[in-house]
Image (spheres, rainbow, N blue to C red):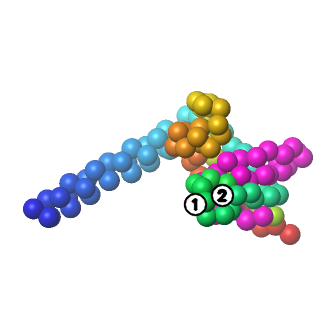
Amino acid sequence: MESLRYVLWSVIISMIVLIQALRVLQAGLLGNYEVVEGTVLEIYGKLPLGKFYKVKIRSPDGGETTLLLEKSVPVEKGVRYRFYFNCRKEALSGIETVDAAWNLGSFYGFEQVEKGR
């Protein structure tokens, strides 16, 4: 009975991962994503309380923007990153942390472009 439950949960988790991978692949093939690139200037809210923190970045053209990221995304101040997001912008409640929690799956990932000086 235990091995049957293990196999069932393994299949369910594998299907979820496969669906997520196919979503990312589809977004990449269709170009249905948004890229935000810049150097991290400030990181707000790194305290253990809460699920998100704000990251203020400066783009190469000099503009500044603030991203709301999960705390599991490890970014460092002074480092340049490229962030990938889903193009859909859904503001459901007007409260940014609530909207970020409801828009799960809108953040695809990030890559480090260059180390800060």
Image quarter of the N terminus: bottom left
Residue 81 in sight from this viewpoint? no
Above or below, 10 relative to 99:
below
Q: Is residue 79 above or below residue 55?
A: below
Most foreground residue, 85 or 89: 89
In front here: 30 or 102? 102
The magenta stretch spans residue 116: no
Q: Which residues are magenta?
A: 54-77
Q: Is residue 105 left or right of residue 113?
A: left
Viewer-side residue, 94 vs 61: 94
Which residue reaches farthest bottom? 117
Amino acid beneath label 1: Ser
Q: Amino acid at mark 2?
A: Glu
Percent of width and height locating residue 65: 79, 44
Residue 71, image x, y percentages: 61, 59
> Disc 1 vs disc 2: which is toward the camera?
1
Residue that carries the numbered disc 2 in the rendered image: 111
Residue extending farthest to the front is: 49
Q: Residue at x 44, y 48 (%)?
A: 21
Badge 2 marks a residue whose secondary structure is strand
Q: At 52% from the left edge and 43% from the top edge, which residue is drawn?
A: 104
Q: Is residue 11 left or right of residue 19?
A: left
**Residue 73 falls inside the magenta stretch:** yes
The disc at residue 72 is 1
Secondary structure beneath disc 1?
A: loop
Could you tell me if residue 71 is visible in this image?
yes
Task: Give me the C-alpha separation between circle 1 and circle 2.
Answer: 14 Å
The residue sitting at 20% across, 54% down in the picture is: 8
**Dot 1 crowding, Cα within 10 Å, few <14, some 14–19, many 20+:** few
Nearer to me, 78 or 100 = 100
Q: Residue at 60% of width from left, 55% of height from top?
A: 50
Q: Which circle marks residue 3 in the picture?
A: none
